[in-house]
Amino acid sequence: MYNVTVDGLWHGYMYITLIVSLAIMGYLALVAGMETLPFKLPASHAQLLLVATGLNFVLTFISFLTNRAARRGSTARTSASSPRSSPWLLVLFPPFRHA
């Protein structure tokens, strides 16, 4: 019904998220393929992934908030689909009734 197209790399800093995502994928492939890494990391595995994915989340969230077309499209899409999906919500999540 509504069609909104937005370039995911509209903001220049979104290239940072692309590079960090590729680095995460490379790191996970390296960890999966080797028992011990050939280099020493300054942080643990969990800390490294938390910081990298947290950075991606923050930059993506900022990009979403500052891009009017994306907000307008998602708002229109949500409001347009809610009347049709509300009967299914009642089926999936029936109102709580006291016995």
Image: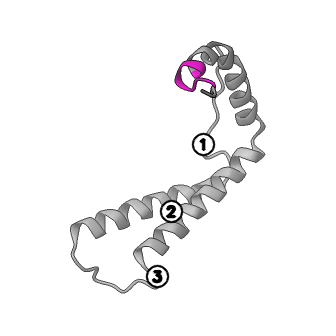
**Mark drawn on residue 70:** none
Q: Which label was assigned to residue 20?
A: 2
Nearer the observer: mark 2 or 3; the answer is: 3
Residue type highlighted by circle 3 = Ala
At 72% from the left and 53% from the top, the residue drawn is: 62
What residue is at 70 percent from the left and 49 percent from the top?
63
In percent of width and height, residue 65 lies at 75, 46
Q: How far apart in space, not on screen, are marks 2 and 1 (Cα)? A: 15 Å
Q: Which is more foreground, mark 1 or mark 3?
A: 3
Q: In the rendered image of this protein, does residue 64 appear above or below residue 74?
A: below
Q: Would residue 30 be counted in the magenta stretch?
A: no
Which residue is under mark 1? 8
Residue 49 in sight from this viewpoint: yes
Question: In the rendered structure, which disc, 2 or 3, sits on the residue that comes first in sequence?
Answer: 2
Tell me if residue 42 comes above or below residue 49 in the rendering.
below
Q: Residue 43, labelled with which disc?
A: 3
> In the picture shown, does residue 10 fall above or below 72?
below
Q: In 3D space, how far apart are the residues under numbered discs 2 and 3 (Cα atoms)?
A: 16 Å
Binning the other alpha carbons within 10 Å of mark 1 as few (below 14), some (14 to 19) or many (20 upward) gives some
Badge 2: residue crowd in 10 Å (few <14, some 14–19, many ≥20): some
SS class, disc 3: loop
Would you call the spot at circle 3 few (<14 residues within 10 Å), some (14-19), or many (20 or more)?
Answer: few
Look at the image and name its color scheme.
one colour
Q: How many marks?
A: 3
